[in-house]
């Protein structure tokens, strides 16, 4: 059975890309201004890999398409077919037809929100390409929904009501009308970034991915107490009056007390001798700072170094904060030296061959690198799209995103949904990123 992937894109910079029939012969194409490898491949119904194989020079590092140059297209028919609107029967099980995915995000170059969401959206498109190779067909519709946009006008587009899943919005003020629309038309509404989404408590069609930090505090504190139950905890007062980590350390100490686990509290104001006296030698010590700031982290490493110098046999691990991932470039050696665990809803392993491959494909497809951000928005979009497309393909509209539904290993962002009463579903996936002393990194899911 031939599977077609049709993109219907409504953005100021993206055009509808036609498809053609694959064959064994080849033709040529003259590159036009602003064309990309990704767009040309889609124009002729081939993959970027097939285009690169037909043009070995494209494999060179930093290769860029040049206007007027001629490239080889591995097809026998250079004339593309004119795309037509989908005529899928909405009553047909989604598992028996192309999945209709909608994107309603700010897709523009006006500000950073738009630029980030463009990258996220490109990751979604790359995921659709991957799904096509697995035999999963996807029809994608994208609408530009800026902060001052008219969401009701977009929802009035007949194509919106035909979607099986809609990813969006970015801004919380659009959640309510989109959630009502999803409920009315039996659509999965995947909210990737909006913090305020009370509809998740009442609307069974809502999937909220973003995890509010305050909601994570108690869960993370409980998991920390459980995971490190055989460690000796040491809470360090770093003297940071601006810290927002007080709720976590308070919750963590409460969890320890419930479990009758003894712990020590020390301060940067203590002498080296008093500071070192908080550590024990008969079990590993777990150090928790009451701040996530970089200056205090650096100071802590200095104090720990003095403790280790005076007591080489003492075992030390540290439990940190998601913000510490921004310091990895500068503190990686210390992270490994002190067995640092960082709780996080994502992890980008830049040494992974799969990550390197997607970054390379992104560069080839779109003529630029991913933004230097954590997390990478393109990888986030890729993970979100793969997760829901595979889920819908396997379980249909009954897909609920619960753990164990299928064996997808995320590139960066794990997803695990739990239903909130009779309402929608919230993402509960979280990890400990462990920088081990042997200089390897492991992810511990919980």
Image: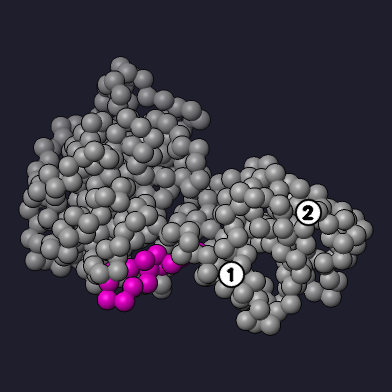
Q: What is the C-alpha distance between the residues marked 2 and 1?
A: 21 Å
Q: Position of residue 349 (x, y in %)?
A: 55, 51
Q: Secondary structure at mark 1?
A: helix
Location of residue 428 (image quadrant): bottom left
Question: Does 288 sit left or right of 84 as displayed?
Answer: right
Q: Secondary structure at mark 2?
A: loop
Q: Residue furthest front?
A: 241
From this view, report whether residue 439 is shown above or below residue 419. Answer: above
- Residue at left offset 64%, top offset 47%: 293
Location of residue 79 (image quadrant): top left
Reading the image, the residue beneath label 1 is: 251
- Residue at left offset 42%, top offset 40%: 361
Question: Does 344 sit left or right of 209 as displayed?
Answer: right
Residue stretch in magenta: 416-430
Q: State the residue in front, 59 or 11.
A: 11
From this view, report whether residue 232 is shown above or below residue 163. Answer: below
Reading the image, the residue beneath label 2 is: 268
Which corner quadrant holds the N terminus?
bottom left
Question: Does 287 sit left or right of 97 as displayed?
Answer: right
């Amino acid at each position: 059975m031939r599977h077609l992937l049709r993109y219907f894109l409504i953005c100021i910079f993206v055009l509808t890309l036609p498809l053609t029939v694959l064959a064994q012969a080849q033709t040529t194409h003259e590159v036009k201004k602003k064309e990309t490898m990704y767009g040309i491949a889609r124009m002729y119904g081939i993959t970027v890999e097939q285009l690169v194989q037909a043009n070995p020079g494209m494999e060179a590092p930093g290769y860029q398409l040049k206007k007027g140059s001629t490239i080889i297209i591995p097809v026998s028919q250079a004339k593309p077919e004119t795309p037509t609107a989908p005529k899928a029967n909405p009553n047909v099980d989604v598992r028996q037809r192309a999945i209709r995915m909608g994107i309603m995000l700010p897709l523009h170059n006006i500000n950073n929100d738009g630029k980030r969401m463009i990258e996220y959206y490109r990751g979604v498109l790359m995921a659709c390409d991957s799904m096509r190779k697995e035999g999963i067909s996807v029809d994608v519709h994208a609408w530009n929904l800026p902060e001052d946009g008219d969401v009701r006008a977009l929802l009035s587009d007949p194509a919106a009501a035909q979607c099986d899943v809609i990813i969006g919005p970015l801004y919380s003020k659009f959640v309510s009308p989109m959630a009502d629309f999803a409920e009315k038309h039996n659509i999965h509404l995947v909210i990737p970034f909006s913090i305020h989404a009370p509809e998740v408590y009442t609307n069974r069609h809502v999937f909220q991915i973003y995890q509010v930090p305050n909601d994570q505090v108690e869960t993370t504190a409980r998991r920390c107490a459980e995971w490190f139950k055989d460690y000796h905890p040491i809470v360090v007062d770093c003297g940071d009056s601006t810290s927002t980590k007080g709720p976590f350390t308070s919750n963590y100490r409460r969890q320890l007390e419930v479990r009758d686990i003894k712990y020590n509290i020390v301060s940067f104001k203590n002498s080296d001798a008093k500071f070192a006296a908080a550590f024990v030698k008969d079990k590993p010590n777990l150090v928790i700072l009451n701040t996530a700031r970089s200056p205090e982290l650096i100071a802590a490493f200095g104090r720990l170094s003095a403790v280790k110098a005076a007591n080489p046999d003492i075992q030390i691990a540290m439990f940190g904060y998601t913000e510490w991932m921004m310091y990895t470039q500068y503190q990686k050696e210390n992270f490994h030296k002190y067995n640092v665990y960082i709780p996080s809803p994502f992890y980008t392993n830049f040494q992974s061959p799969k990550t390197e491959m997607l970054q390379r494909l992104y560069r080839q497809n779109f003529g630029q690198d991913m933004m230097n951000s954590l997390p990478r928005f393109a990888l986030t979009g890729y993970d979100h799209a793969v997760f829901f497309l595979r889920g819908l393909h396997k379980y249909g509209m009954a897909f609920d995103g619960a753990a164990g539904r299928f064996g997808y290993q995320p590139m960066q962002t794990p997803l695990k949904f739990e239903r909130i009463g009779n309402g929608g579903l919230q993402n509960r996936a979280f990890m400990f990123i462990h920088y081990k002393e042997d200089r390897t990194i492991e992810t511990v899911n919980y």
